[in-house]
Amino acid sequence: DLPNQGIHLKVVQEAEEVREVLEEQERVRKLINNALKNRDVNALRAAVTAAEDIGLPGTELEEARALIREIEEEKRVLETIKEAIEARSLDMINDALDRAATLGIETTKEIKQAKVLKERLEEEGRVMAALNDALSSRDVEALKEAIHGASDMGLENATVDSAQSALDELLTQS
């Protein structure tokens, strides 16, 4: 046995320093792995900073950085979807849903809302196309059917008003 457990020896001091570094690296690895598992962007950022501060070697650091980028992209896509829903823009919704599918996010509340709105906007488009076709043809039955379809969907706009006026005019002429 060495006096004072050999603490006065340089090799023991160096070994203690290495042990402390290894313990700190292990602590930071656990932080990164927990943050990766939980997909917690704030915990990931803190873990990445801690890993950079101690010069942590290994793949965990790059995995954490990649996941931060992925989560940030997912947030941007979900924000775009919210904007598309608010704008009621079929093109914006389609683009955002495509980006979301590419990222593998398809089950969020916003995605579900966007899909429902997409179906609604597509149906409105079909109804409006039928209204325009009926207006062009001035066919009484086609106008009645198209106006009924628009009414069922709750559509109220200048095209519906024009179709109703055209139908009224055609009915008074016959």
Image: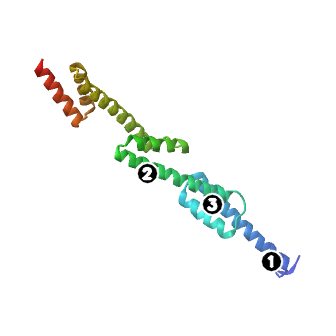
Q: Which residue is depicted at the point 58% across and 64% down?
A: 46
Instruction: Place residue 121 in its image quadrant.
Output: top left
1 or 3: mark nearer the eye: 3
Residue 77's spot in the image, x, y percent? 48, 49
Badge 3 element? helix
From the image, tell me which residue sits under label 1: 13
**Distance from Cα at disc 2 to Cα at disc 1:** 54 Å
Q: Examine the rendered structure and indicate whether residue 137 appears above or below residue 36.
A: above
Is 59 on the left-hand or right-hand side of 13? Answer: left
From the image, tell me which residue sits under label 3: 31
Q: Examine the rendered structure and indicate whether residue 40 appears above or below residue 22.
A: above
Q: Which residue is depicted at the point 77% across and 71% down?
A: 18
Residue 66's spot in the image, x, y percent? 61, 55
Q: Which residue is depicted at the point 72% across and 66% down?
A: 23
The kind of residue tagged 3 is Leu
Q: Earlier in the sequence, mark 1 or mark 3?
A: 1
From the image, tell me which residue sits under label 2: 79
